[in-house]
Amino acid sequence: MKFAQLVVGPAGSGKSTYCENIKQHCDAISRSVHVVNLDPAAEEFKYPVSIDVRDLVTLDDVMEEMQLGPNGGLLYCMEYLEENLEEWLGGELEAYGDDDYLLFDCPGQIELYSHLSVFRTFVEYLKRDGWQICVVYCLDCQFISEMPKFVAGTLSALSAMVQLELPHINVLTKVDMCKNKEALDAFRFPDAMEMRHELDRQTGPHFRKLNEAVVQLLDDFSMVTFTPLDISEEESIEDLLLQIDMAIQYGEDQEVKTHEHGDMEDPDDGDGPDY
Amino acid sequence: MATEASAGMQNLNIQDQAGQQEAPKPTVILVIGMAGSGKTTFLQRLNAHLHEKQLPGYIINLDPAVTKLPYGAHVDIRDTVNYKNVMKQYSLGPNGAILTSLNLFATRFDQVVGLCEKQRDPPLQYIVADTPGQIEIFTWSASGAIVTEAFASTFPTMIAYIIDTPRCLGPQTFMTNMLQACSILYKTRLPVLLVFNKVDVARHESCLDWMADFENFHQALDSEQSYAATLSRSMSLVLEQFYQNMRAVGVSAVTGEGMDDFMAGVTKCAQEYEEQYKPELVKRQQDRSQQEQQRQAAELERLRADRTADGDIAAAAAASMSRGSGKTVLDGRKGAALQRLAEEEEAEGVLD
């Protein structure tokens, strides 16, 4: 089996830093992980990238040649990627097979997920090609100081992912920069009731029914929990990686292999959780 | 239309400042939407509409990367911040440069608010702000939050959420858009007006139907996607509640259709602001200043406690000196120095 994380989130949420840190952590424990850059507008990389969409198309080139601004240019890049998906990405991915683990650093702009079909096409392609995928949604913890803002963050996450139908983990990034870490605990495992209570407290009375419906929705989508990531703490990185590994069932193969001599094939086909 | 708008304004005045003869505050319209939804074209149409109806408006452009603006802005971020220079100077890509440009502008935003607050003749009725192309640069940035709060704490403020109607004809994309709008509602805690743009290309009535009738939407969603029943049901319910809390209008920036409906929607949102949103905002600001006061009081207490401790040390040093412990000269010097320090601090008093 092949494993992939799609790292998504608004611009500046720390996706690339996340990829860099996971890569460094895995290198340190001799675990093989490769990073793929899917952002044509990405700037510099501090870590080695195994596959880079900028080999195929860059935002600068498109803006210059097609005379487009940054938004139009990015949309064009993504549509170009979609056209060349099987040929280019398929070609690049051939080098990766069983037990390989890829981190796809995706562009931030939500328009790409809602208005373009490129991400759906991309996910369908990966699934067909035998990849177990998990979406990792990054949100900057500095924006989540109060419950209504937290809910705004999860709704934004949901709007990006509602069309992807994949298991996901939500990550609160930049916890190392957070001055009040205890306050973050409130958002770690909020109970739906607590969430509603806190929301009602912080919004006007005309929000009551909407609060109820929204909390129900988030609960149904399991969008309520966020895992904090403190890149200065090795343990924090480990815990997060473990969670994601569980979501894509990475490591189950490994266990079967140690009992190879007597066992038959892996009975568990490894289908993701049902939605 | 002008009469309805000015009547709305007058109501605000009566509620707001009893006894004062100041002009009613203008309403701020923050134009937010996904890239390609037609914000800038809509602003152009709005500007023309305000001129046509002789409603004094003040236009602010907050998009640093726009090349050609089809309307005259009174305040343009590009006059203060050069986006291309920012890219070069800080070695940033286009997104980073837009964000940084907005950050730089936000540091001076009190000046913009000052300009808006100036008394004019005739007095301003609307302040309209165009935001950067990519929605998250405004909605998920510190500078976006600063700009929003600067407006909201000074004027009745509402969000005009521009929707690319032709792209929303599928229930899934529609849902994505509505979830975004809902996210903005919770993030800003300001009234949101859903503006279905480009109705000359695709009618928005089917979207309104979905919002008004949750069963309808549920069916459409089920037929398009294989979600678990609970999920599509929850989504439909949110949509229905959303509709209760949100106004929606259909416009075409290109043909001008729906602009009167839009202005009526703005007036209603401004009323909602005064009745529902402003009291919450004021309460939050009071909570915040209370917390700040408590924090300062705690700081002062700590300062006082420290100074008392030093004073004790000085007194002890002076006492041991007078007892003649042997190292009289050294102790004396030290004791005197500490004593001097304690006296100086006493004289300085509490620093702000």
Image (tube, helix red, strand yellow):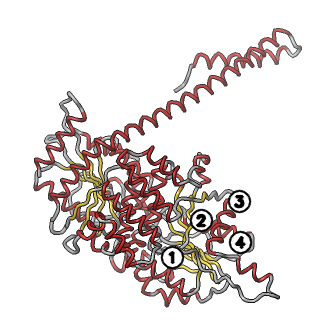
Residue at the far right: name it: B326
Distance, label 4 to label 3, CA atoms, is 15 Å
> Which sits earlier in the primary sequence, circle 4 or circle 3?
4
Amino acid type shown at disc 1: Leu
Give B277 or B234, whichever is nearer the viewer. Answer: B234
Distance, label 3 to label 2, CA atoms, is 14 Å
Please tell me the numbered disc located at residue A235.
3
Circle 1 residues within 10 Å: few <14, some 14–19, many ≥20: many
Residue A83 placed where, x, y %? 42, 86
What kind of element bears circle 3?
Answer: helix
Q: Which residue is mark 2?
A: A18
Circle 2 residues within 10 Å: few <14, some 14–19, many ≥20: many
Q: Quadrant of residue B283?
A: top left
Distance, label 2 to label 4, CA atoms, is 14 Å
In the rendered view, tell whether residue B150 sits above or below residue A43. Answer: above
Amino acid type shown at disc 2: Tyr
The answer to whether the residue labelled 3 contacts the one labelled 1, judged by CB atoms less than 8 Å apart, is no
The mark tally for this picture is 4
Distance, label 4 to label 1, CA atoms, is 21 Å
Q: Which residue is mark 1?
A: A38
